[in-house]
Image (tube, rainbow, N blue to C red):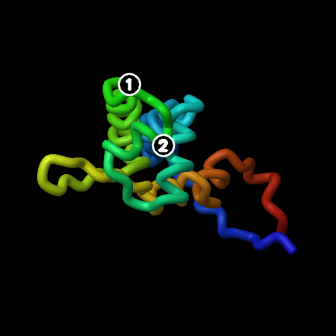
């Protein structure tokens, strides 16, 4: 059974399209998806270990991590000289939420 979600139709100016654009651009790369997948599987991971896990030099990895950080899809915690990364579950869940799908639902498609 499909759960029905209330549709909150917002005025266009209340929707942060730029934020969605940045997140979806960040998701549009296989390496960044791999990084996110590994963080999902392993939890908090040191950048030194992440280079081996995703088989990428640290300079390229840093580039991808910055894009994911800017899109708020991952979080960073610094412990001493090392940075640890983990998935930002609340932001990822928001992208996969009914809230986003409802932005694009036509009002006449809503069941009575």
Residue 93 or residue 34, whichever sits in front = 34
Q: In this view, does 5 lie to the left or right of 36?
A: right
User: Residue 108: x percent and y percent?
Assistant: 80, 52
Q: In this view, does 3 lie to the left or right of 75?
A: right
Q: Which of marks 2 and 1 is in front?
A: 2
User: Residue 8: x percent and y percent?
Assistant: 59, 61
Q: Residue at x 61, y 49 (%)?
A: 103
User: Is 60 placed above or below 2 here?
Assistant: above
Q: In which quarter of the image is the N terminus?
A: bottom right
Q: Do the residues labelled 2 and 1 touch (CB within 8 Å)?
A: no
User: Which element is circle 2 on?
Assistant: helix
Q: Which residue is drawn at 83% across and 69% down?
A: 112
Q: In this view, does 61 lie to the left or right of 98?
A: left
User: Is 57 placed above or below 20 here?
Assistant: above
Residue 36, visible in the rendered structure: yes
Which mark sits nearer the N-terminus, 2 or 1?
2
**Residue tagged 2:** 53
Q: Which residue lies furthest to the left in this view?
A: 80
Query: Which mark identifies residue 80?
Result: none
Residue 20, visible in the rendered structure: no
**Residue tagged 1:** 60
């Amino acid at each position: 059974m499909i759960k029905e979600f209330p549709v909150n139709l917002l005025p266009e100016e209340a929707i942060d399209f730029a934020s969605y654009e940045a997140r979806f651009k960040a998701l549009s790369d296989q390496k960044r998806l791999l990084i996110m997948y590994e963080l999902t599987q392993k939890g908090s991971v040191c950048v030194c270990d992440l280079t081996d896990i995703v088989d990428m030099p640290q300079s390229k990895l840093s580039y991808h991590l910055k894009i994911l950080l800017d899109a708020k899809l991952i979080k960073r915690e610094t412990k001493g000289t090392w940075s640890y990364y983990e998935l930002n579950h609340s932001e990822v869940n928001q992208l996969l939420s009914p809230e986003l799908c409802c932005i694009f639902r036509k009002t006449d498609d809503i069941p009575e």
